[in-house]
Image (cartoon, rainbow, N blue to C red):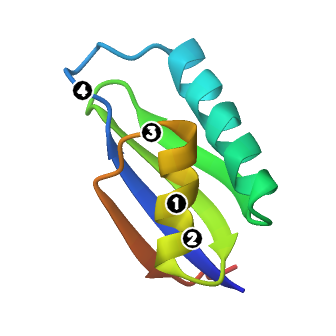
């Protein structure tokens, strides 16, 4: 499987709370799991109005479909690699 970074604009700066970010990611994580994908974690900035999630999947299209099933807006999906 490959890793994909989902890029989200969260709306107006300050419109999202920490609880909103956690709730949204958990909703997406469940949708991804039902499709056989693994949403591993998310990063977000309340100050900048962006959120990013990392998902293990076979294709970009699978990540887009999982977001659609969760009802989440998605700006872009980028295949990435991790350096440890």
| Residue occupying the far left of the picture | 12
CB of mark 4 within 8 Å of CB of mark 3? no
Pointer 3 or 2: first along the chain: 2
**Neighbour tally class for label 3: few under 14, some 14-19, many 20 plus, Cα within 10 Å:** some
Q: Helix, strand or loop at disc 4?
A: loop
Residue 37 versus residue 10 in the image, above or below = below
Give the residue pinned by disc 2.
Answer: 62
- Distance from label 4 to label 3 (Cα)? 12 Å
In the rendered view of the protein, which quadrant contains the C terminus?
Answer: bottom right
- Distance from label 4 to label 1 (Cα)? 21 Å
Give the residue pinned by disc 1.
Answer: 65
Q: Which mark is residue 11?
A: 4
In the rendered view of the protein, which quadrant contains the N terminus?
Answer: bottom right
User: Measuring 46% from the left and 62% from the top, which residue is drawn there?
Assistant: 64
Q: Which mark is residue 72?
A: 3
Pointer 4 or 2: first along the chain: 4
> Which mark is in front, 4 or 2?
2
Q: Helix, strand or loop at disc 2?
A: helix
Q: Helix, strand or loop at disc 3?
A: loop
Q: On the rendered structure, is 34 left or right of 19?
A: right
Pointer 4 or 3: first along the chain: 4
User: Measuring 52% from the left and 60% from the top, which residue is drawn there?
Assistant: 65
**Neighbour tally class for label 2: few under 14, some 14-19, many 20 plus, Cα within 10 Å:** some
CB of mark 3 within 8 Å of CB of mark 2? no
| Figure label count | 4
- Distance from label 3 to label 2 (Cα)? 14 Å
> Which mark is in front, 3 or 1?
1
- Distance from label 3 to label 1 (Cα)? 10 Å
Q: Which mark is residue 26?
A: none
């Amino acid at each position: 499987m490959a890793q994909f970074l989902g890029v989200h604009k969260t709306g107006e700066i300050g419109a999202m709370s920490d609880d909103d970010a956690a709730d949204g990611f958990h909703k997406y994580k469940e949708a991804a799991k039902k499709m056989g994908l693994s949403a591993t974690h998310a990063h977000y900035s309340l100050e900048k109005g962006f959120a990013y999630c990392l998902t293990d999947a076979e294709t970009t299209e699978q990540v887009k479909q999982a977001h659609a099933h969760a009802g989440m807006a998605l700006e872009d999906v980028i295949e990435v690699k991790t350096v440890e």
